[in-house]
Image (spheres, rainbow, N blue to C red):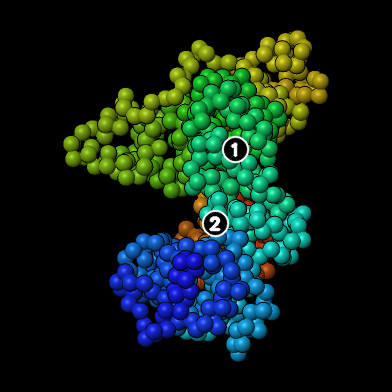
């Protein structure tokens, strides 16, 4: 046929003069002889079915010159070719490449599978091939993860005929079919869960085509969800992706983002999707757009059980925190991770801490959550530390004062103690030249604590330039962010009651506005609830605690007697810790990548002298002895840092940060054990 003859001509017309002008729109071609053409056609017969225009476009891209500047992360080969650029191969290199590996001309995934390694080894006849393959894995490691071993041999051959590594990177980035999935699961997959002895190629190829991802990301999906290896593309994967995309009105990019972050969604039934989406629409009052935004932030929302997880949390917000139902959907959209937290061990204990430390009602806590849902994403320890800091630093008298500040500016809890709250408090104290006046200003206008550093400095500058009274200028105004929920009046304060199965109330099973509501929940009389609170006895396996009028101010830390302090020298040491995970997670990459962790400790003192320097050296020695694998780095005489590697199999950011804090405590413990007999110093560690 005409198409067949055109393709044969493309494979051989480059022999005439061994040069073809690719700058113009003239036909290009390779320099194969008749035997080479016959070899290619017999080994890759699918080529006869391709349109000759597509084959010509591929060859033109191979032999067009490389642009002067190019970002491999943003390669658009069609755009490059329209501008006259390509991979920069010579006619001879392109001919040798496609003669050795006709599958490089494949236009479809099912045609791109390369022959076996033994076949390639015999055909290439390239000396030092094994060493070349080692170099391929070193140079192209980021592209070859999860690929078939034959890909490395093919690229080794390309480099042996003079094609540079940068040119190979361009080819792999521009032509995704040049690399294929490895169908044999390695030990890394086998140790993670049930997996087939031979992966299903149609399923992997369909995922690559549907999600527009490479073998590396498919490999990460399999590491995260090994059961994916057994899913059929027609009966399982395609229906689930179609249902998910159509039900949430997702774009292809959004669908890819969700599956890369939560590949286990592919194992769900369509009815399971429907049940959860119906719950969000009917009970949480969310639109499809709101649900989509929430799922993009937290794909696991579609996997939480409706009866045991989602609905109880919805009832907690509405019944216990008295949040109007129309605001619950906004809370889920703003902070969907809340729906994955434990009610008894996370959400309720956080509410209890705020209620007790701020003399607030559950309704007022609900108003804070409705205004700033991210507050409940903080750890309970973080919330309590911030409240204690504000209460102590501003010299508040009653815990209710702290509650009023929090109601006025709930985002105070989201601020960092060192880099935000402390800095702003010290800045205004310096400005007013009075600690007492600055404290009163913050009490009257707590929203100053949530301003950014730049906005605060701009306001200070405008006040100075206008020559206005500082104290009057920083008083609260009507401008600012509107509240999502109208706050209750002072007369609406309730007698909050907590119920727990734990005598120490480490987990909370219920929060109620008064004794009557708690009694109704337990099916007993109000008198029995009052007696249980007073006697601290268990009723039906639950303990009851009522706040009532017993709310007390936050206790400040007791200090050592003045005489004892006078006889001892006080030295304050600050230990700053940081933990991180490499490579970092992001929503555009698949889960399942191999990661490692590292930490840094920075120890500094509040004074400089020989004695302090000696203690720093002892701390540094304690740090060196506290870690098995470490690379100590001395910054200067006043600061010590240590970098340690710790063997988490799959570390997360939270694990790294926790390990960093654990590392600091470990160093302090080691140091203190060496100075148990020291009676000359008071060492204060922060």
At a point 66% along the width and 84% down the height, the residue shown is: 122
- Neighbours of disc 1 within 10 Å: few (<14), some (14-19), many (20+): some
Question: Dot 1 lies on which element?
Answer: helix
Direction left: furthest residue = 466
* 367, 399: nearer the viewer: 367
Answer with mark 1 or mark 2, whichever residue precedes in sequence: 2
Q: Position of residue 428 (x, y in %)?
A: 34, 40
- x, y percentage for residue 265? 64, 43
Tag 1 residue: 243
Residue 378's spot in the image, x, y percent?
56, 40
Extreme-front residue of the structure: 1
- From where the camera sits, is residue 74 visible? yes
Out of 370 and 387, give the one closest to the viewer. 370
Helix, strand, or loop for circle 2? Answer: loop
What is the quadrant of residue 80 in the picture? bottom left
Residue sitting nearer the eye, 685 or 43 = 43
Q: Residues within 10 Å of mark 2 (few under 14, many from 20)?
A: some
* Left or right: 430 as drawn, with respect to 159: left
Asked where in the image residue 538 lies, by quadrant, the reply is top right
Number of numbered discs visible in the structure rendering: 2
Q: Distance between the residues labelled 1 and 2?
A: 20 Å
Q: Is residue 455 left or right of residue 560?
A: left
Q: Can residue 562 be seen in this view?
A: no
Residue 404 picture location, percent across and down: 46, 25
Do residues under tags 1 and 2 come within 8 Å of each other at their CB atoms? Answer: no
Q: Please, is residue 118 above or below residue 125 in the view?
A: above
Q: In this view, does 100 lie above or below 366?
A: below
> Image point 26% across, 34% down: which residue?
470
Residue annotated with mark 2: 213
In screen coordinates, is 489 left or right of 25?
right
- The residue located at (52%, 13%) in the rendering is 492
The residue shown at (36%, 61%) is 79
């Amino acid at each position: 046929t005409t198409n067949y003859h055109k393709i044969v001509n493309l494979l051989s017309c480059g022999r005439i003069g061994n040069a073809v002008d690719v700058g113009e729109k003239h036909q290009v071609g390779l320099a194969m002889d008749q035997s080479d053409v016959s070899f290619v056609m017999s080994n890759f017969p699918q080529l006869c079915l391709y349109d000759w225009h597509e084959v010509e476009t591929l060859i033109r891209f191979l032999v067009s010159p490389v642009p002067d500047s190019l970002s491999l992360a943003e390669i658009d080969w069609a755009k490059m070719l329209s501008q006259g650029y390509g991979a920069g191969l010579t006619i001879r290199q392109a001919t040798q490449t496609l003669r050795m590996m006709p599958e490089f001309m494949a236009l479809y995934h099912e045609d791109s599978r390369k022959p076996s390694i033994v076949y390639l080894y015999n055909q290439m006849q390239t000396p030092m091939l094994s060493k070349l393959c080692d170099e391929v894995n070193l140079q192209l490691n980021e592209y070859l993860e999860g690929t078939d071993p034959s890909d490395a041999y093919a690229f080794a051959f390309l480099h042996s005929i003079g094609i540079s590594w940068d040119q190979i990177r361009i080819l792999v980035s521009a032509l995704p079919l040049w690399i294929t999935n490895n169908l044999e699961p390695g030990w890394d997959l086998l140790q993670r869960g049930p997996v087939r002895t031979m992966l299903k190629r149609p399923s992997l190829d369909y995922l690559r085509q549907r999600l527009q991802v490479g073998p590396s990301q498919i490999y990460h999906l399999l590491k995260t969800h090994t059961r994916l290896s057994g899913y059929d593309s027609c009966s399982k994967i395609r229906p689930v992706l179609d249902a998910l995309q159509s039900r949430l009105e997702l774009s292809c990019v959004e669908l890819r983002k969700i599956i890369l972050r939560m590949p286990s969604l592919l194992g769900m039934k369509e009815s399971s999707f429907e049940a959860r989406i119906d719950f969000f629409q009917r009970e949480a009052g969310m639109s499809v757009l709101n649900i989509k935004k929430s799922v993009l932030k937290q794909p696991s929302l579609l996997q939480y059980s409706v009866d045991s997880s989602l609905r109880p949390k919805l009832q907690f917000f509405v019944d216990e925190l008295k949040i109007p139902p129309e605001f619950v959907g906004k809370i889920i959209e703003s902070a969907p991770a809340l729906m994955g937290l434990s009610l008894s061990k996370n959400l309720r204990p956080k509410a209890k801490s705020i209620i007790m430390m701020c003399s607030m009602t559950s309704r007022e806590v609900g108003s804070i959550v409705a205004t700033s849902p991210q507050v409940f994403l903080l750890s309970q320890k973080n919330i309590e530390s911030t409240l204690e800091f504000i209460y102590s630093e501003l010299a508040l008298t009653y815990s209710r004062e702290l509650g009023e500040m929090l109601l006025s500016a709930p985002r105070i809890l989201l601020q960092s103690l060192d880099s935000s709250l402390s800095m702003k408090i010290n800045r205004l104290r310096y400005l007013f030249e009075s600690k007492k006046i600055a404290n009163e200003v913050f009490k009257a206008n707590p929203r100053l604590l949530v301003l950014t550093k730049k906005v605060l400095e701009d306001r200070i500058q405008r006040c100075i330039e206008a020559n206005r009274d500082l104290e009057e200028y920083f008083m609260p105004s009507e401008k600012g962010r509107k509240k999502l929920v109208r706050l209750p009046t002072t007369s609406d304060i309730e007698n909050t009651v907590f119920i727990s199965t734990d005598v120490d109330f480490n987990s909370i099973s219920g929060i109620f506005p008064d004794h009557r509501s708690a009694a109704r929940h337990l099916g007993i009389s109000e008198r029995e609830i009052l007696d249980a609170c007073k006697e601290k006895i268990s009723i039906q396996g639950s303990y009851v605690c009522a706040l009532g009028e017993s709310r007390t101010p936050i206790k400040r830390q007791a200090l050592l007697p003045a005489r004892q302090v006078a006889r001892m020298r006080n030295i304050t040491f600050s230990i700053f810790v940081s933990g991180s995970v490499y490579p970092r997670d992001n929503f555009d990459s698949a889960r399942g990548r191999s990661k490692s962790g590292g930490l840094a400790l920075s120890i500094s003192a509040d004074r400089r002298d020989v004695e302090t320097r000696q203690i720093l050296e002892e701390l540094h020695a304690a740090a060196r002895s506290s870690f098995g694998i470490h690379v100590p780095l001395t910054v200067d005489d006043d600061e010590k840092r240590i970098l340690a590697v710790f063997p988490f199999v799959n570390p997360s950011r939270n694990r790294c940060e926790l390990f960093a804090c654990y590392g600091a405590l470990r160093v302090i413990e080691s140091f203190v054990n060496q100075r148990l007999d020291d009676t000359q110093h008071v060492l204060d560690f922060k």
